[in-house]
Image (cartoon, rainbow, N blue to C red):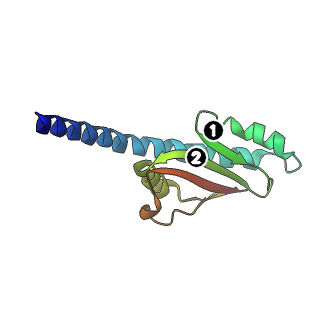
Amino acid sequence: MLAILLVAAAHQLDFAAHRLDVAAPAQALAIRAALFELAAATRALPAGMTGDSAAKALYRHVADRDALLDVTRFPSEVDVTFRGLGRAACIETESMARRLEGSVVVQLEGYATASDCGGSNAMTWRIMP
């Protein structure tokens, strides 16, 4: 009986892990989209804007996520940290959004390889208009 329960528990864990792996690409795409939005919004802000005003203007692009904005170096740089990312989401996001280039450069800090992704991750990107 115990063996049957252990097998059932293992299958449940396997199914849960598979569900998380399937969700990871969608989460990575959503973060990548948010980074593009933040980059465009940061570029559009007037250079003379105060940090508090810049934070309020930018926060709406990440309000639905567990994210922190650091505008202490605005207008030359804004940092955004997405917290609570699982290993699969970290790997997917690192692959999809390591560096985004255009009129604004968005660069991931750290996470040089997939092995840098742990069970729970806080990933920071530097947005440089």
In this rendering, position of residue 31 left or right of residue 6: right
Q: Amino acid at mark 2?
A: Phe
What is the x, y in percent for residue 21? 35, 45
Q: Nearer the viewer, residue 81 or 96?
A: 81
What is the x, y in percent for residue 95? 45, 57
Residue density around tag 1, few if under 14, some if 14–19, many if 20 or more, within 10 Å: some
Given this view, does label 1 or label 2 mark the residue nearer the observer?
2
Specify the quadrant that holds the N terminus.
top left
**Residue at image location 34% in from the left, 42% down from the top:** 22
Secondary structure, mark 2, is: strand
Residue density around tag 2, few if under 14, some if 14–19, many if 20 or more, within 10 Å: some
**Residue at image location 76% in from the left, 38% down from the top:** 57
**Residue at image location 29% in from the left, 42% down from the top:** 18
Secondary structure, mark 1, is: loop
Mark 1–mark 2 distance (CA, rounded to whole Å):
9 Å
| CB within 8 Å, label 1 to label 2 | yes
What residue would you read off at disc 1? 62
The label on residue 47 is none
Residue furthest front as drawn: 2
Observer able to see residue 7: yes
Observer able to see residue 103: no
Q: Amino acid at mark 1?
A: Val
In this rendering, position of residue 77 left or right of residue 26: right
**Residue at image location 51% in from the left, 41% down from the top:** 30
What is the x, y in percent for residue 90? 46, 52
Q: Nearer the viewer, residue 15 or 105?
A: 15
Residue furthest bottom as drawn: 112
What residue would you read off at disc 2? 82
Residue furthest left as drawn: 1
Specify the quadrant that holds the C terminus.
bottom right
What is the x, y in percent for residue 106? 63, 57
**Could you say which quadrant of the image residue 41 lies in?**
top right
